[in-house]
């Protein structure tokens, strides 16, 4: 209950999305910020006042984690701008000094979303690198590391994610071998990003009550993704509103059942920089959800991908 309070989730039922994006990140922040005992104490205490203090500490740790994450992400993005096509076409392998090893996995996932290629991020300290690896659906990360294992001190993981240790002297050799494995995979498989939607369904044919019934299918997660629909030829009802750092995210309204419905597109702000919202249409891949803020609830579209309508 104390953790729900700091997440502003008190007084209502908790969804799987609340756990994924609010509760779990705060618990995980303890280990990422080298303070794992705080999370354990919160989960085992029966003292409400102590629970409140511990939850506040986790919330503060999570905010620190976000700051560190954004700093590393900006540094990594700057690095990618200086890399050659040889170093970015099939995968990204980046190194940094004293990056927080508990955070680089999150940053690697963000870079996968941005580049649509597998990403390895390695943090060096005292001549030894600790790395986090994140993959795309079509690329087997563990298999790739098996093929480069002679350059690593040790590694472990699975198809989608892994961790590794590599010495300073072996990093460049590992990087080149890994990039070659990724290039070979790109040539031999359907390697690029693929998005499979469940059905074509414009938002003006999707009642809020139907979306509420979809919550009965929860919990959603890996191998049990939430429904993904595609709306075609949609028009914005007002100018898009940019959000977040440097306006990288955006929200806008499209026609829904009985009136406008808000859509949010995280990390897709650049698409709308020169967008003529009065005259242009868009196709959206989206997941409908009930957005909750305090005691207020309303239908919202979480945009997964966006494109210009084909043939227009």
Image: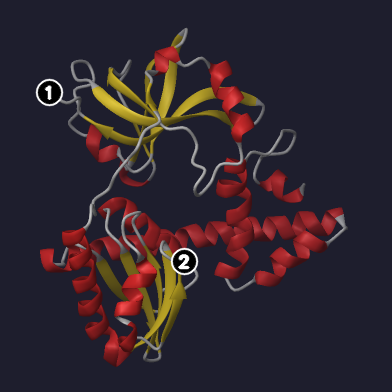
Which SS class for mark 2?
loop
Above or below, 182 against 234 in this view is below
What residue is pinned by disc 1?
A: 311
- In-front residue for pair 175/57: 175
Q: Nearer the viewer, residue 270 or 122?
A: 122
Q: Position of residue 179 (x, y in %)?
A: 21, 71
Q: Nearer the viewer, mark 1 or mark 2?
A: 1
Badge 1 or badge 2: first in the primary sequence: 2
* Rendered position, 40 above or below 294: below
Picture quarter containing residue 174?
bottom left
Position above or below: 237 against 117: above
Asked where in the image residue 152 lies, by quadrant, the reply is bottom left
Q: Residue at left 20%, top 78%?
A: 176
Q: Which mark is residue 125?
A: none
Q: Nearer the viewer, residue 116 or 224?
A: 224
Q: Residue at x 74, y 60 (%)?
A: 54
Q: Is residue 90 left or right of residue 131?
A: left
* Residue occupying the far right of the picture: 46
> x%, y% of residue 191?
24, 54
Q: Residue at x 27, y 58 (%)?
A: 117
Q: Quadrant of the C terminus?
A: top left
What x and y, as percent, mark residue 281? 22, 20
Q: Is residue 293 visible?
A: no
In this picture the colour scheme is: secondary structure
- Disc 1 is placed on an element classified as loop
Q: Percent position (x, y) of residue 275?
A: 20, 28
Q: Quadrant of residue 177?
A: bottom left
Number of disc labels = 2
Judging by the rendered image, the residue that carries numbered circle 2 is 103
């Amino acid at each position: 209950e104390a953790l729900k309070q700091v997440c502003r989730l008190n007084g209502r039922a908790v969804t799987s999305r609340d756990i994924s994006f609010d509760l779990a990140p705060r618990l995980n922040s303890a280990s990422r910020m080298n303070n794992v005992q705080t999370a354990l104490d919160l989960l085992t205490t029966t003292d409400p006042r102590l629970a409140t203090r511990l939850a506040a500490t986790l919330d503060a740790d999570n905010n620190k984690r976000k700051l560190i994450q954004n700093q590393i992400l900006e540094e990594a993005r700057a690095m990618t701008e200086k890399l050659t096509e040889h170093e970015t076409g099939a995968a990204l392998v980046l190194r940094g000094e004293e990056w927080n090893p508990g955070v680089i996995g999150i940053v690697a996932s963000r870079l996968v979303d941005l580049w649509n290629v597998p990403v390895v991020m390695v943090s060096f300290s005292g001549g030894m690198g600790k790395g986090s690896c994140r993959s795309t659906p079509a690329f087997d990360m563990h298999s790739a590391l098996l093929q480069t294992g002679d350059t690593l001190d040790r590694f472990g993981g699975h198809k989608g994610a892994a961790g590794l240790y590599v010495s300073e002297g072996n990093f460049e050799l590992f990087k080149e071998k890994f990039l070659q494995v990724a290039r070979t995979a790109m040539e031999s498989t359907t390697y690029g990003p693929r998005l499979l939607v469940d059905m074509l369904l414009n938002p003006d044919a999707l009642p809020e009550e139907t979306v509420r019934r979809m919550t009965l299918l929860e919990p959603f997660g890996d191998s049990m993704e939430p429904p993904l629909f595609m709306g075609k030829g949609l028009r914005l009802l007002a100018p898009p509103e940019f959000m977040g750092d440097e306006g990288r995210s955006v929200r806008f309204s499209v026609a829904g059942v009985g009136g406008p419905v808000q859509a949010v597109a995280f990390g897709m702000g650049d698409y709308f920089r020169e967008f003529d919202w009065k005259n242009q249409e868009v196709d959206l891949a989206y997941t409908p959800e009930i957005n909750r803020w305090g005691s207020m609830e309303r239908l919202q579209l979480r945009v997964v991908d966006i494109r210009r309508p084909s043939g227009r």
